[in-house]
């Protein structure tokens, strides 16, 4: 349901696309940067799955934010 809703929003009017791009820009880039600098891994150290998952997920979040920025020429 969620990916379909986001797709419909992104294929809507250009004015709405601009605002959605702004929101995603700040959520993805700032959220990814803050979470990589101050990770909350619930006390699990390096070899644990939660530690690795946290850095992979938030690193991808940052990469997706940069990709949206480059694709939309923001």
Image (cartoon, rainbow, N blue to C red):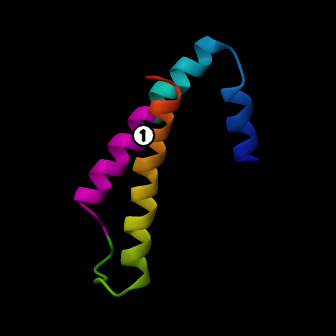
Give me the residue at 39% from left, 57% from top: 59
Residue assigned mark 1: 66
Question: Percent from the top left, x then y, of residue 9?
Answer: 68, 28
Question: Percent from the top left, x then y, of residue 16?
Answer: 61, 17
Give the prevailing secondary structure in the magenta stretch.
helix
> What range of the chain is rendered magenta?
25-40
How many numbered discs sit on the rendered protein? Answer: 1
Q: Is residue 63 left or right of residue 18?
A: left
Give me the residue at 73% from left, 37% from top: 5
Residue 30, placed above or below residue 48:
above
Question: Percent from the top left, x then y, of residue 23?
Answer: 47, 30
| Residue projecting furthest to the bottom | 47
Question: Does residue 38 belong to the magenta stretch?
Answer: yes
At mark 1, the secondary structure is helix
Which residue occupies the foreground of this view, 72 or 55? 72
Residue 6, placed above or below residue 63:
above
| Residue projecting furthest to the left | 37
Q: Is residue 68 left or right of residue 34?
A: right
Which residue occupies the foreground of this view, 69 or 61? 69
Give me the residue at 76% from left, 41% from top: 4
Give me the residue at 29% from left, 83% from top: 46
Residue 59, placed above or below residue 13:
below
Question: Does residue 26 belong to the magenta stretch?
Answer: yes
The 10 Å Cα crowd at callout 1, few under 14, some 14 to 19, many 20 or more, is: some
Question: Percent from the top left, x then y, of residue 69?
Answer: 45, 31
């Amino acid at each position: 349901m969620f990916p379909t809703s986001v797709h419909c929003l992104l294929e809507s009017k250009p004015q709405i696309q601009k605002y959605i791009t702004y929101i995603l820009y700040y959520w993805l880039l700032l959220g990814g940067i803050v979470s990589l600098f101050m990770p909350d891994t619930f006390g699990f150290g390096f070899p644990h799955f939660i530690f690795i998952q946290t850095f992979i997920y938030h690193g991808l979040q940052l990469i997706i934010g940069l990709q949206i920025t480059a694709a939309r020429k923001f």
